Image: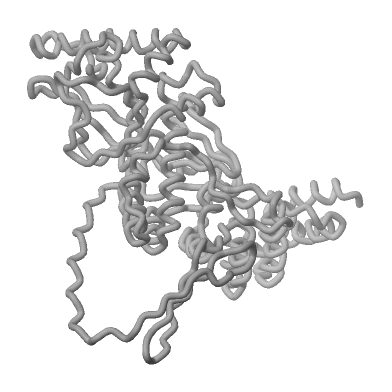
């Protein structure tokens, strides 16, 4: 029987619940097509449905290794999870995934060793030279007189964290302090230069793609991450989560597909294998903005709980930095997809435009713009929330993707309202000079911002003249 007929009969038998027969067809097919790892995974599931756990585990192991070496990490994760469900002793598979995809440690520029010589100590400094560590310096320290150890300064009180993004930011700053590099400069960097750190992979693995988040994790953290994230199964039409619910995890599609919608007849997106979703509510702490349901007979999702990410970011400073980059990249991608400011631009031009923005992180109750002061640029809310008020009266609240500061920039006037963060918030700021240059070269942006300004000015006048004349909520002014 030709391979095509074997595969068709295997699929038919599986769909009809004749799993033993399906397994026989799949096995015969895989003998002739050993590189078809999708069929290997289906063979494993067929044997699992018949109770043949050892044979199922063997098939899933072949599938997991094949997917991983072809660069299909989400499918490799799903096959590995199923393998461990069937045979928990197969610990080598997650280690294999970590060897292929986790960030490899880079040799430090300088490594120091303390050697106790009895009558004193010798500190040796070895410096990297290619693949070798060569002597760089040596310092002799005679024995010091005994003295009472000074009391350690009290540890700073941890900041309260309302969202995963705040937890990650705090852990990243703590990691920088432990390394003696400070933390303030990282919070003022130009957000999303998106220059990836160079990963020293072996030449044979150079063809493997970098996977967001996964490829930035050190090996041990990768394995802990894998072990802490369960694999979830969803049938066609089954909801993953509902609009308005609280986000406690985000998801990676390992197999199958989902649709994202707000109303039954208003589909926002259709997502397939390898896609991420659900991270926005998880990072920002806001309710889910849409409902997600499975659109395939079996959808396999890797669930990534906030608790796992928070634990790893506190334990591994490298993970906190990787998560910070991942979180902000996802937030930025969402803002570029939803904010009207970025709609006139192509994907490439959006990235170039974003590079002109600067990052600013503000704490809860911190003032961003004060009424009567000069506005330093156009602001976009990346995550969190800000509140605009005039004369003590709240005018509006702005969340992810929304703009403020444009009225003062267009009219060349001081700020007409005060803007304050209602919780920890990440902002993007386009400096005044760049804004002036942008509207000269992109008249469509000027038209958009001018229209928004006009709406907000009318809204402000209505609110400040009396509640009975207020129009339906637009947004802010500034």
Quadrant assignment for the C terminus: top left
Q: Residue at x 46, y 11 (%)?
A: 442
The quarter holding residue 156 reads bottom left
Give 424 or 302, whichever is nearer the viewer: 424
User: At x 34% / y 39%, what residue is drawn?
Assistant: 188
Visual colour scheme:
one colour
Q: Is residue 15 left or right of residue 272?
A: right
Q: Which of 285 and 386 is in front in this view?
A: 386
Q: Quadrant of residue 356?
A: top left
Q: How many marks?
A: 0
User: In screen coordinates, is 306 left or right of 159?
Assistant: right
User: At which x and y percent is residue 150?
Assistant: 18, 75
> Can residue 52 be spotted in the picture?
yes
Residue furthest bottom as drawn: 118
Looking at this view, name the residue that lies furthest to the right.
Answer: 1
- Figure quadrant of residue 420: top left
From this view, report whether residue 350 is shown above or below residue 202.
above
Residue 321, image x and y in percent? 42, 52
Is residue 42 at all visible to an observer of this figure?
A: no
Q: Which residue is drawn at 37% across and 60% down?
A: 179
Residue 226 image point, x, y percent: 52, 61
Q: In front: 31, or 65?
A: 65
């Amino acid at each position: 029987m030709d391979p095509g007929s074997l595969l068709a009969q295997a699929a038919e038998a599986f769909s009809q619940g004749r799993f033993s027969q399906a397994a026989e067809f799949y096995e015969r097919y895989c003998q002739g097509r050993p590189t078809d790892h999708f069929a290997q995974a289906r063979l494993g599931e067929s044997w699992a449905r018949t109770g043949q756990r050892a044979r199922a585990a063997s098939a899933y192991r072949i599938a997991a290794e094949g997917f991983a070496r072809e660069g299909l990490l989400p499918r490799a994760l799903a096959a590995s999870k199923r393998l461990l469900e069937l045979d928990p002793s197969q610990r080598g598979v997650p280690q294999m995934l970590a060897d292929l995809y986790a960030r490899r440690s880079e040799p430090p520029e300088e490594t120091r060793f303390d050697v106790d010589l009895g009558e004193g100590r010798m500190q040796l400094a070895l410096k990297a030279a290619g693949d070798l560590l060569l002597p760089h310096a040596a310092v002799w320290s005679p024995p010091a007189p005994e003295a009472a150890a000074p009391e350690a300064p009290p540890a700073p009180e941890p900041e309260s964290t309302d969202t995963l993004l705040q937890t990650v930011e705090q852990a990243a700053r703590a990691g920088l302090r432990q390394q003696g590099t400070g933390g303030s400069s990282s919070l003022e960097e130009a957000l999303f230069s998106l220059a990836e750190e160079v990963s020293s992979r072996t030449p044979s693995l150079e063809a493997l793609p970098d996977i967001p988040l996964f490829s930035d994790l050190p090996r041990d953290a990768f394995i802990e991450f894998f072990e802490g994230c369960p694999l979830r199964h969803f049938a066609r039409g089954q909801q993953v989560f509902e609009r308005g619910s609280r986000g406690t995890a985000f998801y990676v599609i390992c197999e199958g597909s989902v649709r994202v919608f707000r109303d039954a007849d208003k589909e926002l997106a259709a997502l397939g294998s390898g896609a991420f979703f659900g991270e926005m509510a998880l990072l920002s702490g806001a309710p889910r903005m849409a409902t997600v349901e499975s659109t395939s007979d079996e959808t396999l999702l890797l669930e990534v709980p906030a608790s796992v990410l928070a634990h790893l970011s506190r334990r591994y400073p490298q993970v906190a930095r990787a998560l910070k980059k991942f979180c902000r990249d996802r937030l930025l991608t969402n803002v570029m997809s939803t904010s009207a400011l970025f709609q006139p631009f192509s994907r490439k031009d959006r990235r170039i435009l974003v590079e002109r923005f600067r990052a600013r992180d503000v704490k809860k109750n911190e003032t961003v713009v004060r009424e009567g002061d000069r506005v330093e640029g156009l602001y976009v809310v990346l995550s969190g929330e800000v509140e605009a008020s005039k004369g003590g009266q709240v005018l509006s609240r702005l969340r992810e993707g929304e703009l403020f500061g444009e009225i003062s920039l267009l009219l060349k006037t001081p700020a007409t309202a005060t803007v304050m963060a209602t919780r920890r918030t990440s902002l993007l700021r386009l400096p005044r000079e760049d804004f002036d240059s942008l509207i000269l070269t992109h008249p469509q942006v000027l038209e958009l911002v001018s229209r928004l300004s006009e709406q907000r000015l009318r809204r402000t006048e209505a609110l400040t003249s009396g509640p009975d004349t207020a129009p339906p909520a637009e947004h802010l002014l500034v």
